[in-house]
Image: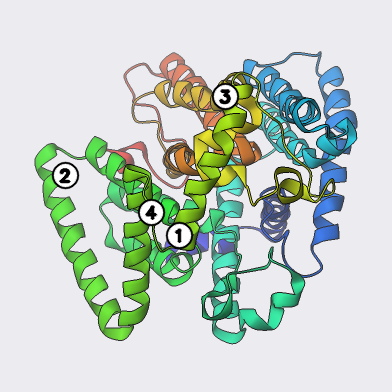
């Protein structure tokens, strides 16, 4: 297909090498392989490199450019400080954990330097948006092939000795703990591209990625969140009549797929249906269920509430796994803040800290609203779609608190695209006011994205 040629083959070897380097940096920044055997120390080295980039490379770069900071840069720098010090201080106050353990537990905050560097790289045109788009899709297809190969050729039980980080579940329920972020991004990318161009081939690519490699590894909340995200764009980009017609076609296709899946493996589909039912029962009724995962979240909410009531504004901090036996040792029972979504965020950083983290989406919303008409591109659509997915799934997973480096990377892309679109519109008006400005994407005309 022409898209694969444009992204992977139709570029010079030097450019392909650059996209490979960007893809490698993205894989490390998004912690894609941190639980894989032998990758723990590699990921720790990446934390160190990001810290050096934050305290050496970035300051030197800013000084050389005159110490001019955008509002997004100021926010990211503030968020890094908040992400490190607020949880460390909260855990020291409530549980007596030494500050050093709390700071080290939040070392992932250094990954946000990638967004700082990207903001400046886009501003000074040191990196092309086409290369970022190609690197993201390279990560998506690369991890897709890797995960599919693992599921076809390896048995998770043979790797249980590597710890719960790499293999989750027990017995027949065990599975590899795989990071599907890039595949989810590419799924959104292709579906939205299909909606824009009305080309079915993009829906096929999205189906291959999602059904083939994502469905077995994503949580229930992720499946619901991506469905809600795509329905939102379908509603926004289609007249109401076409929206209902398309929705009906999607429901019919889903029914056929589920029917075929049930015929092929009725036991698996029944188990998954029961898990979704239990999740909704816990969410809307608070009743106990047979599903251990859904039931555990109910007990975690009960565990968290006294702490939230005690420190509602600034939270109770983040307990390091290296101190006092982790949360189980300190709180005398299993507890993981991310399991209970926004409540978990409030438990960790309080209401004020949660609002500071949530402000990430304000930059994305402002950038999306500033796009000139006709200046949208596949990358801008996909970035906006993925950020909406992150916002929806954060309700149940607190993703915006646990992984701000991911959200801020796409915020930086969206802000950069909006700035480029505004500049391009101004230049086109100055050159020929009567001529419509071209698309940001060099491979497509602006009319290609008209709905």
In terms of secondary structure, where does tag 4 sit?
Answer: helix
Q: Which residue is mark 4?
A: 279
CA–CA distance between discs 2 and 1?
27 Å
Report if residue 26 is visible in the image: yes
Of residues 199 and 182, the one nearer the viewer is 182
Q: Is residue 413 visible?
A: no
Mark 1 highlights which residue? 3
User: Could you say where residue 260 lies in the image, as x and y percent from the top left?
Assistant: 25, 79
Q: How far is disc 4 from disc 3 in space, using C-alphas?
A: 25 Å
Labelled pair 3, 1 in contact (Cβ < 8 Å): no
Question: Which mark's residue is nearer the viewer, 3 or 2?
Answer: 3
**Disc 2 marks which residue?**
243
Q: Which mark is residue 292?
A: none
Tell me the CA gap for discs 4 and 1. Answer: 39 Å
Residue sitting at x 88%, y 33%: 98
Depth check, mark 2 against mark 1: the one in front is 2
Label 4 packing within 10 angstroms: few (<14), some (14-19), many (20+): many
Secondary element at tag 1: helix
How far apart, in angstroms, are the residues tagged by discs 3 and 2?
44 Å
Residue 23 percent location from the top left of the image: 67, 54
Element type at marker 2? helix
Circle nearer the viewer, 2 or 4 = 4
Other-residue count near label 1 (Cα within 10 Å), few / some / many at <14 / 14–19 / ≥20: few
- Of labels 4 and 3, the one closer to you: 3
Q: Which residue is mark 3?
A: 309
Identify the residue at image location x=84%, y=52%. 44
Q: Is residue 193 left or right of residue 423?
A: left
Do the residues bearing badges 4 and 3 touch, measured as CB atoms within 8 Å?
A: no
Answer with the quarter of the image where residue 278 lies.
bottom left
Real-space Cα distance between discs 2 and 4? Answer: 28 Å
Q: Quadrant of residue 37?
A: bottom right
Q: How is the image coloured?
A: rainbow
């Amino acid at each position: 297909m022409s898209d694969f040629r444009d992204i992977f083959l139709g570029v010079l070897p030097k450019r392909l090498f650059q996209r490979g380097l960007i893809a490698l940096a993205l894989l490390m920044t998004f912690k894609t392989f941190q639980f894989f055997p032998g990758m723990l120390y590699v990921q720790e080295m990446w934390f160190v490199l990001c810290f050096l980039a934050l305290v050496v490379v970035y300051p030197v770069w800013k000084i050389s450019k005159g110490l001019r900071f955008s509002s997004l840069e100021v926010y990211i720098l503030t968020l890094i400080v908040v992400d490190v010090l607020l949880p460390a201080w909260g855990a020291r106050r409530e549980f007596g954990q030494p500050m050093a353990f709390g700071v080290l537990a939040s070392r992932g905050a250094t990954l946000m330097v990638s967004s700082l560097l990207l903001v400046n790289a886009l501003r000074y045109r040191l990196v092309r948006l086409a290369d970022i788009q190609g690197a993201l899709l390279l990560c998506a297809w690369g991890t897709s092939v890797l995960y599919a190969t693992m599921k076809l050729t390896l048995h998770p039980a043979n790797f249980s000795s590597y710890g719960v980080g790499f293999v989750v579940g027990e017995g027949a329920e065990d599975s590899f703990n795989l990071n599907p972020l890039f595949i989810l991004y590419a799924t959104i990318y292709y579906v939205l591209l299909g909606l824009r161009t009305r080309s079915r081939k993009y829906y096929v690519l999205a189906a291959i990625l999602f059904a083939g490699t994502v469905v077995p590894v994503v949580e229930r909340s992720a499946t619901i969140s991506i469905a809600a995200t795509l329905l939102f764009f379908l509603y926004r980009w289609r007249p109401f009549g076409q929206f209902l017609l398309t929705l009906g076609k999607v429901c019919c296709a889903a029914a056929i797929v589920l029917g075929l899946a049930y015929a092929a493996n009725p036991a698996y589909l029944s188990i998954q249906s029961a898990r979704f039912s239990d999740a909704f029962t816990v969410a809307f009724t608070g009743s106990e269920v047979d599903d251990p995962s859904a039931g555990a979240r109910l007990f975690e909410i009960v565990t968290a509430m006294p702490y939230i009531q005690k420190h509602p504004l600034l939270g109770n901090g983040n307990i390091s796994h290296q101190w006092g036996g982790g949360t189980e040792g300190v709180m005398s029972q299993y507890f993981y803040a991310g399991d209970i979504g926004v409540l978990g965020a409030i438990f960790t950083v309080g209401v004020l800290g949660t609002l500071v983290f949530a402000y990430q989406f304000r930059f994305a919303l402002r950038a999306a609203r500033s796009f000139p008409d006709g200046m949208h591109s596949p990358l801008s659509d996909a970035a906006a779609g993925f950020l909406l997915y992150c916002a929806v799934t954060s309700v149940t997973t607190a993703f915006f608190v646990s992984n701000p480096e991911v959200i801020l990377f796409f915020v930086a892309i969206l802000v950069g695209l909006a700035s480029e679109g505004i500049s391009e519109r101004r230049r086109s008006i100055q050159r020929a006011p009567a001529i419509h400005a071209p698309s940001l994407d060099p491979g497509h005309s602006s009319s290609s994205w008209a709905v």
